[in-house]
Amino acid sequence: MIGGGACGRLLRGSASRWPRCWVLECRLGSSYPGGGGGGGGGGGGPANVFDRSMKKRQKEWANAVHDSHKYDYLREEVGARVADRVYDVARTFPLALEIGAGRGYVAQHLSKETVEHLLLTDISQSALRQNAGGDMRCHALAADEEFLPFRENSFHLVLSSMSLHWVNDLPAALGQIHGVLKPDGAFIGAMAGGQTLYQLRCSLQLAETEREGGLSPRVSPYAAVADLGNLLGRAGFNLLTVDTDEVQVNYPSVVEVMMDLQEMYGEEDGSVPATFDVLYMIGWKAHRSQAKAAKRGSATASFGDLSKIGRKDDAGE
């Protein structure tokens, strides 16, 4: 388990005086000690798409809703798939960080054989208190994903599940993640992709065009799978893996405002489908032990020669 002093040494020098940051010791499945408000908002520049202080309040409100865990099925499913990718890496990570952890949607699927020590962070302190359970012992830190308060080269693994699509500056956030990783450390994450909720977006666009004669942004912007690899490369990651998956959830028709969506995309059982496009990413911080690509032009064989192999064998017979 991470000791209190060791956890403090992970923070940048100014973080111990950062008024919006609390270190909370916890065991997943139990209540967190302490209280008070949580992590703060991002910079209020004119280019910001999201008000981070408002996003924190939204999370706090959502966690105060009775039986709010019933609405976590998507986060739990994606968290399990992120954990599967951790298990695919044949090593044990001594110290890992999960950003935007919420109730520990990835942590609940991990084991000590894969991750020895885990630090959870989220902008919402109440989300960290209402963890989803599991056997991992960890620490939790209320902190904004846009401003990671950790020293460089601190973690062997950084995880993120369904939170990075809410940050204002994704390239900068990826750069911070790269910075806190140790050499040969891995970043494994998932975020909503460009085709998320396309049924809802198409319905809103058609309805607004018909009634208002124009369009206004109604859905948050998402990253495209074609751009994600470039962003990871710009942040300094190598050995990149980016893949996409779709999760479709069928909702019952319960409100009149969804009638247009049901008429256009409704299923035979009367349900309304919503498709979530999930982008998964893996990137590694450079280290001399990692495999490197051969120099351009150094190959001694061509892919075109593969088609000749069978013909040579037939000729020999």
Image (cartoon, rainbow, N blue to C red):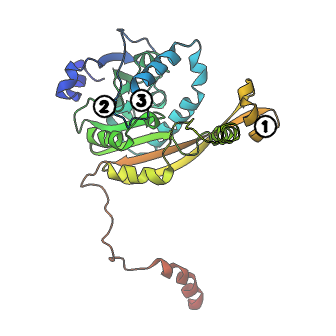
Q: Is residue 120 visible?
A: yes
Q: Label 1: few (<14), some or many (≥20) within 10 Å?
A: few
Q: Mark 1 or mark 3: name the one nearer the start of the chain.
A: 3
- Report the disc number at residue 263: 1
Name the residue furthest front. 213
**For the N terminus, which image quadrant?**
top left
Residue flagged by tag 3: what amino acid is it?
Answer: Gly
Q: Is residue 242 left or right of residue 71?
A: left
As helix, strand or loop, the secondary structure at mark 3 comes to loop
Q: Residue at x 33, y 16 (%)?
A: 25
- Label 1 with label 3: CB-CB less than 8 Å: no
Q: Mark 1 or mark 2: name the one nearer the start of the chain.
A: 2
As helix, strand or loop, the secondary structure at mark 2 comes to loop
Query: Along the line of sight, which residue is nearer the eye, 126 or 96?
Result: 126
For mark 3, what is the residue?
100
Residue flagged by tag 1: what amino acid is it?
Answer: Glu
For mark 2, what is the residue?
147
Q: Is residue 272 left or right of residue 220?
A: right
Residue flagged by tag 2: what amino acid is it?
Answer: Phe
